[in-house]
Image: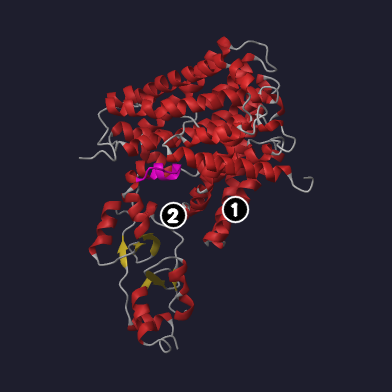
Amino acid sequence: MKVSEWISRFPGHIVTIHPEDSLEQVVDQLLAGPCVQDIYVVSGADLVLGHLSHKRLASLLLAEHRPIHTRRQIMERVVLGPAEELMEGEFVFARPDEELDDVLCRFVDHDLQDMVVLDAQGVLAGGINLNTVLREIRKRPNVIFD
Amino acid sequence: MDAISPITLNLGLLLLTGLIFGYIASCYNLPRVAAYVIAGMIFSPDLLGQLEWIEIGDWAAPLTTTALGIIAYLIGGSITLKQLRRSGKVIFTSAIGESLGAVLCVFAAFCLILPDTYALSAVQLALAFSAIAATTAPAGTIAILHQYRARGPVANTLLGVVALDDAIGIVLFSLMMVVVVGESLALSMGTAVLEIGGALVLGILVGRILCQFGKIFHQGGLLLPVVLGHILLALGLAEILNFSPLLATMALGFSSRYFSRAAGGRMFIQVEYFEELVFLIFFTLAGAHFEFTVFVGHLDLIFVYFCARIIGKIGGAALGAAAAGASQPIVHWLGLGLIPQAGVAVGLALTLGNNPVFKEVSTMIVNVILATTLLYEVFGPLAAKFALGRANELGVERGKEG
């Protein structure tokens, strides 16, 4: 099954934020939905710029509760920037024309819950949710990837 | 015995002894740094160093250079241009003030007290000690902020300054090396421009290449060798071209983060795990250089360095903060939080010994810096706690709530 077919059958919801959003705004978005683990920074033209994980946001918000900091973490704590400075610009994604079978290992390798699907221009085309995939595998172990 | 390399054996023994001592110290809430040093002391010439197969010799030089290169890379990558702009004038001028204050005070004090009986002139030695004085160890300060839940403008400025001043320290150290090693001041100025400028250009160029490689080898397992390879490349090229290796790797860290933009952070995450290993190597090696007679013979230098650096830090931080119009609590109390000095200073002292100019005095320098580091590790956190208390920024101590 192609990724494009999967996202038309199971349209996943990708939580997006603006590049200039503050940490607090991003965390509010994270907590607004149930079990959101991945947030994507998207420009006005739906161009996906970067990824923020639940763990990264939690570590930023709880920085003062950490007894040991690297120098990089100290500066992040002192001058906390907007989402575009906190995000990871090199992130994992899928293309609509890829086989779903080839994409799934990325969830495990990169500890993702929601993976974005980007078209050739880097514009958001949809998302794949890991739980939906797992549910389908449990229901029909041999058929969904044919 | 011949089949066993004494280098790997000695290094293995040093690291494992340091780890075990560090673990025991942490069980009793004692500073791990001191435990590492004591572990190293066991291998010093006065103790196990007398054994034939214990030899902390020339093999340590490339190790300390590489280890300090890794730390310089991390220091360079710890801040971005945007963060520097946003951090504000107070943090910037305070960091400059306290670094230069410590350097000037130690330089002046050592010029006054150093006799001309060493292989180097008093001014050259004073320059060497003063260049090490600028650095500050963030770990002790962070531990106090965490333990007492400190919050407020002094705590925040303190964090910004401790993150910045090691970078200033490395620039000052690199300048000092050019001046001391140079044949004359006029020649030194020309050489300084070449060595410093060359190191910066080299670091930026290698940083650009690292950024490109980082995009190709973006998976975690491959990124670490890519980054380490570029650090070694920058160090090696800098040594061959007679540029400052520390500045080159610091520029590499800064530029690779700049060129990688939003993906810059991942260039550092895995290398940051090396920091504790690097400091373990520094402290155990420095401990192995401990010589009781040298230590006792230079108690006066230890005392003067200890006091002059503190005076410089407090005075310089106050002047720097006042120049930027900081509030009174910051002007009054910031400097007292900047006393700890540890790994970077010891690493700089060890690398001095790798230069032939400092060969004769390197044991003395390492012993003085080692002794003062242990003193600063004890008094530094106490001073930081006192300063934050006077600034009314201490919260409820962890573990003593309710």
Where does label 1 land, which residue? B209
Q: Quadrant of residue B240?
A: top right
Query: Can see residue B100?
Result: yes
| Residue positioned most to the right | B2
Q: Quadrant of residue B115?
A: top right
Judging from the image, the colouring scheme is: secondary structure
Looking at the picture, how far across and down is residue B359, in whole percent?
Answer: 70, 26
Left or right of B72 on screen, residue B384: left
Q: Which residues are magenta?
A: A66-76
Q: Amino acid at mark 1?
A: Ile
Q: What residue is shown with label 2?
A: B262
**Would you say the residues marked 2 and 1 are in contact, meaning their CB atoms lie under 8 Å apart?**
no
Image quarter hosting the N terminus of chain B? top right
Residue that appears at 52% across and 13% down: B109
Nearer to us in this view, B193 or B97: B97
Q: Amino acid at mark 2?
A: Ala
The residue under the point 36% across, 28% down is B384
